[in-house]
Each structure stands twice: as C-alpha cells, then as structure tokens.
Amino acid sequence: MMTLSRWKIIAVVLAAIFGVLFSVPNMLSQQTLDSMPGFFPRQQLNLGLDLQGGSHLLLEVDTEALRAERLVNTLEDTRVTLNGEGIAFTELRQQGGEITLRTTDPARRDDAVRVLRNTLGTVLPGAAGGRDLTVRNNGAAGVRIAFVEEAMNAEAAKAVEQSIEIIRRRIDELGTREPTIIRQGVDRIVVQAPGESDPERLKNVIGQTAKLTFQMVDESADLAAAAEGRAPPGSEVLPSEDGLNPFIVVRRRALVSGEMLTDASQGFDAQTGEAVVNFRFNSLGARRFGEATAQNIGQRFAIVLDGKVISAPVIRSAITGGNGQISGSFTPESANDLAVLLRAGALPAPLTVEEQRTVGAELGADAVRAGQISTTIGFITILVFMVVAYGGLFGGISVIALLVNALMIIAIMSVTQATLTLPGIAGLILTLAVAVDANVLIYERMRDEIRAGRTAISAMDAGFSKAMSSIIDANVTTILAALIMFQFGSGPVRGFAWTLSIGVLTSVFTAVLVTQVLLALWFRAKRPKTLPIV
C-alpha cells in the first residue's frame, strides 16, 4: 500500500490541478472571467433559490378543464362524422361527462353506433372496444358516448408530465439557469426559478396556455343572437381583441393548430413598424393552411389564442409558403413573450397558481454568508482536532487532503452545473467532517501496529491496508443513503444528497490516496525509525 507508484503521484497532481482550476472561477467576478484566455474554465456554481433569491410558484393543472375540452371536441367530431355519413340526428348534447343524441330514423341507430365506434376517440390497448371511449345504444333511437375513466385518468396524468416539460422549455427560453420543476402530488407542480426577480412575468409566461388555432369566421351568424351568446351549431362566440368588434363568431373546427408550428419569433411589420410575431408551419401545417386559404379567398379567418381572437384578416390569396405573421396590440416584449410560448408549445390544460413566494436577493446573500461562516468554523474545528490528536505532520497532511477534497467537490459541482442550496452547504460541511473519519481509522491502526512492535514502514502499510475494508463499508452505506434521498426526495433534500454523494467519492480518494502519497514522500525523505503519531 505504501509503494510510491508513478500513477498515484500523477493521479494526486491531476486531482489537485483539476480542483484548483475549476474552483477558481467561483472566486472571480464575471468581468474578470470574460477577460481570461479562451481555454480558462468559466463554469461557476449555480446557486439555488435560497442562496441567490428568486421566485417560487405552486401550480395546479386543471385536469377538469382538460376533460371538458375533450368532451366538446368529441361532440363536434360526432356532428361532423354523422353528417358525413348522411345519418340524420337530433338532440345532440353534453350531459355531465357523457354525450347523447337521437337518430331521426330509429332504424339507423345501429349504423350511427358502428360509425362512431370506428371513428371517435383514440386506440387504447385494453380499453373497452379498443378505444378510450364507449359508444352504446340508449333507448329506441338514442346513442350514448362516454369516456373510459381509466383512460381519462391516464390522460390527466400525461397532461401533468407534458406541462412540466413545457414549463421547463418556457423558463429555459427566458434564460433562467437551473430552474427546479418537480411534480407534487397528483396534479400539482412546484417551480423554483433562482434569480428571477419578476414573479408576475414568470407567472404570465408559465401560466398562459398558449393554445393557438386558426378558425374560419362564421359570416352567416346572426349578430343579434351572437351578442346574447347564442351561436349556430358548429360555431362559437369568442371575445375579440382586434379593435373592431367586441366579439366574433367562428367555426369550432380549427383549420390549423399551433401544434404544427416549427418556429416563432418576434419581429416588426415592414409597413407599419409595429411589433408582430412571425411564425412558420411544418409541412403538414403548411399544406393544410395553403388548402384552407385557397378554398376561402375573400373570407375572414380568425387567429385565436387561448379563446380570444387576436385578429381576423381577410384572405386575399392562397398562403402556400408555410409562413405567416400575427399582428395585434403588441409591444416588443409582449410579442417576444408570445413567441416564447409558441416555440415551447401549448399547455395541455390550464394552470392555476396556488401559492407564490419571492425570495429577495438580500436574504440569499445572508444565507451565503451564513454558509461561508459555518463552513469556515467547521473546517477550523476539524483542523484543530486533527493537529491536536495526531500532531502537526500527520494532522497537517490530513488537512491538506481535506482541502483538496473541498476543491474537488466545488470543481465537480461547477463542471456539472449542479445547483448549490443551503442544504447542499450542510451536505458539504457534513462531508468535510466525515472525510477525516478515514484518516482517523488509518492513523489509529498505525498506532496499534507501532504498539505491537512493528517497524514504521510496516505500521504505515498496515494502517492503510487493514483500514480499507472499514472505510469502504462506511462510505458505501453513506452513498446508498444519499442515492435513496436523491431518488425519492425533492428540492432541498436532493441538493443535500447530491453534495453528499460527490463528497463521498472525493473523500475516499483524498483521504486514502492523497494522504498515502504525501506520507510516502515524507518517509522517503526522512527515513524515520518511529512515527510521530504515537
């Protein structure tokens, strides 16, 4: 164990260089880092919400709205399907969580059931009829359509997962570093955005559903009836923001949806100079948009965002390029925010803000100072103990190994861009305290061997070789506990577990290898007859 191999020296030197090189950026200002050569590392520790301040939001996914929207879409699909098959019907309505209708000709009820079973819903293995909804007879001429409850629950759970991913993309577009976005319970999402000082803008960007559709305006609708909220079958009354009418009647069926967008960006209109949002469709969206505009020249189509008509221009010619422009009462910032939303995608269901907290930068700075003070006190306490217990040489070497350990932890967290939180600082302090346990085991074994009459070199060798099994056992159990906390914990618990996991790995390396190399170099230089540890 005490053989001074070349690979051991190289490993220790490289570890020390790595620790220093990648830890130094955390001690420099951004201006100083920008002036450094290109090869110099620039990654710094990401400070969590509790250390640099920011916004904390607790959001709830409105899964009931998702169910309601699915029912409305299915009702419209039912209308279109039966009309396309020439099956006359009446009393098509939504009742609770079901859709009911009556065929005008009772003899065609079975035809209606067969067609709807084969057309509506999506294929779902294991569900009744092979789909996520059931179509059944309901009396002499009636038809009843109901969703499979298990399928709706699975869709709601999927909506929460999709919401998490979309929220992450939206926050990343804002430039927020290392946001924490985790699921809480069945339908809630916790969002922590360190450094985001404007929670209202964060709520606006996160909470807006951003469901974009292009729908034809129903020019045949009775405006007087529409003013009372009554629209013809297959149409709906939507509020308008185009400045011409307070409301517009549009066809329910969308020509193209925002899911077919491939890009969106903020720009300015070449003629008016006002802020606009430029967008581009994928091949399917471009084809559908081109066909729809070619078939409806001279008519108006509505650009609808979250149930409100942004604008309703007249189609002058077929738009076949797949590119378009959304204009309205935009400022450059609001146009950019909308472009961010459209690029990230629409939320599958609305979000409700259940809780909002803002952590000021001053509180974060206080937490950083408190962490620095506690880390310094912990390190000094360990230094004094090791020097008093094992002398200046052996105690000093263990402290040097501890310094290398701390630098390696900071360097690894900087390179991996891990987020350091206040519990993470607690994990760092615990790691430093536990790291010297390995040195204590090694040194105490050396003392036992010296008392048993062994020579200095054999006592040192036995101290490292015979203490290794205890060191490995202790650290394996610690890292297993840390991995369990990381897997099942959230937020601060995961931060603590991550720091502790890194610390366990670096502690074994430094407490054993760094200490061993330094002691071997000392022994080769001094050739002592006994060890000053006794």
Image (tube, rainbow, N blue to C red):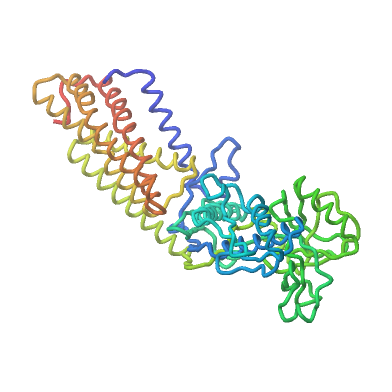
Relative to residue 351, is residue 490 drawn left or right? left
Q: Position of residue 475 (x, y in %)?
A: 28, 36
Q: In this image, 359 relative to 275: left or right? A: left
For residue 199, side relative to residue 443 (left or right): right
Q: In which quarter of the image is the N terminus?
A: top left
- Tell me which residue sits at (66%, 56%) in the image: 340
Q: Nearer the viewer, residue 489 or 239?
A: 239
Residue 168 appears at what percent x and percent y?
56, 53
State the residue at coordinates (23%, 23%).
465
Q: Can residue 147 be seen in this view?
A: yes
Residue 249 location, quadrant: bottom right
Position above or below: 134 against 60 = above
Q: Position of residue 132 (x, y in %)?
A: 56, 52
- Residue displayed at 64% across by 64% down: 141
Q: In this view, does 403 lie to the left or right of 287?
A: left
Residue situated in front as seen by the camera: 46 or 244: 244
**Residue 491 position by quadrant:** bottom left
Quarter occupied by the C terminus: top left
Position of 159 relative to 469 (above/below): below
The quarter of the picture where residue 301 lies is bottom right
- What count of labels does the image hold? 0
Q: Nearer the viewer, residue 444 or 521?
A: 444
Depth check, front residue: 161 or 143:
143
Q: Is residue 194 visible in the rendered structure shown here? A: no
In the rendered image of this protein, does residue 525 appear above or below residue 128?
above
Instruction: Indicate the position of residue 214 as horizontal and vertical percent values.
Output: 76, 60
